[in-house]
Image (cartoon, grey):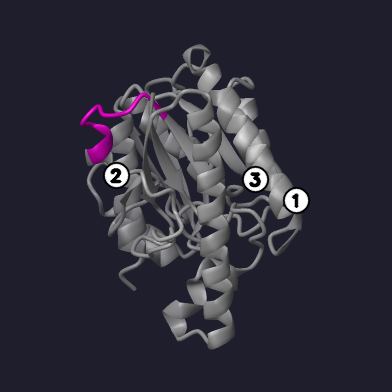
Amino acid sequence: MRIVISADIEGASGVVSGRETGYPRKVGGDPQSAAEYRAACRWLTEDINAAIEGARAAGASEFVVHDSHGMDYANVLLDELDPSVDVVKGMPLVFFDPGDLEKGHYDAAFLIGMHARAGQPGVQSHVLDWPRFWEVRINGLPVSESTLSIALASYYHLPTILVTGDDLICGEVSRWTNGVIETAVVKYSFSRYAARCVGMKNARDLIRSAASRAVKNARKIPPAAFSTPITLEVDILDPQLALYVSWMPNIEYDGACTVRYRSDDFLRIYKTLFAMFWLCHLD
């Protein structure tokens, strides 16, 4: 079995703070923040290694990691990652690189280090951007980056079989997929900025065991997709940015902060969402 892994950092074991996710470096940062980010990168890398160990023990043979936090960040520590694993990195890379998925190299997907969606009291909760994107909905359902990642993998006929992160995202994924995806909860969120973190050794044991079960049960886990026609809605905090987004072709606009796009093709939905994201970052 060949597995593609999308790795984010907010949901990695032990991570609770914006300093640990690397964002302060965008505004200069400081040595303490840099040290905390480096530690979080190591924790994320160890989570990935644990998932690979569990999957390999159950029969998986090949792994490729998509380093997908922060668009242009290098979060996975290559010198500490399992040396047999390839890494897709660069910019722009969020969730997965669609060009890699469409080549048909993979049999299943893992999501490692996932976090709660915008509006939830989960550690560093957001969808793509906080606070510009106040909420993202598909077919009326508020969605997370994990839900979007699962749907993107499904577009390429890949089942997502493992998700690791906080209790809120693992619960959301389980509800949306009727409990068929294996999850590993590595922390229990108290708020957007605090959580009870499972001890590192225990967290890695949970990930390792969940990954092993996921590979063993992979044939029972179908791809999960949204029913068509698909309606994307985005609540944008700044009405001026919402107005700019409304100038895109085929975008509906409520005249305030919500924009809407419809399609039968999820990849069009995905690309439109990212076009909105980039446009909102031109200010």
Per the rendered image, the range of residues in magenta is: 100-108
At which x and y percent is residue 123?
66, 57
Q: Amino acid at mark 3?
A: Arg
On screen, residue 86 above or below 72: above
Q: Which residue is mark 1?
A: 198
Q: Amino acid at mark 2?
A: Asp
Residue 204's disc number: 3
Q: Is residue 105 magenta?
A: yes
The picture quadrant where one finds residue 217 is top right
> Considering the numbered disc 3 on the image, is that residue within a helix, a strand or a loop?
helix
Q: Is residue 4 magenta?
A: no
Residue 142 visible in image: no
Q: Earlier in the sequence, mark 3 or mark 2?
A: 2
Q: CA distance from mark 2 to mark 1?
A: 31 Å
The picture quadrant where one finds residue 190 is bottom right
Q: Which residue is mark 2?
A: 97
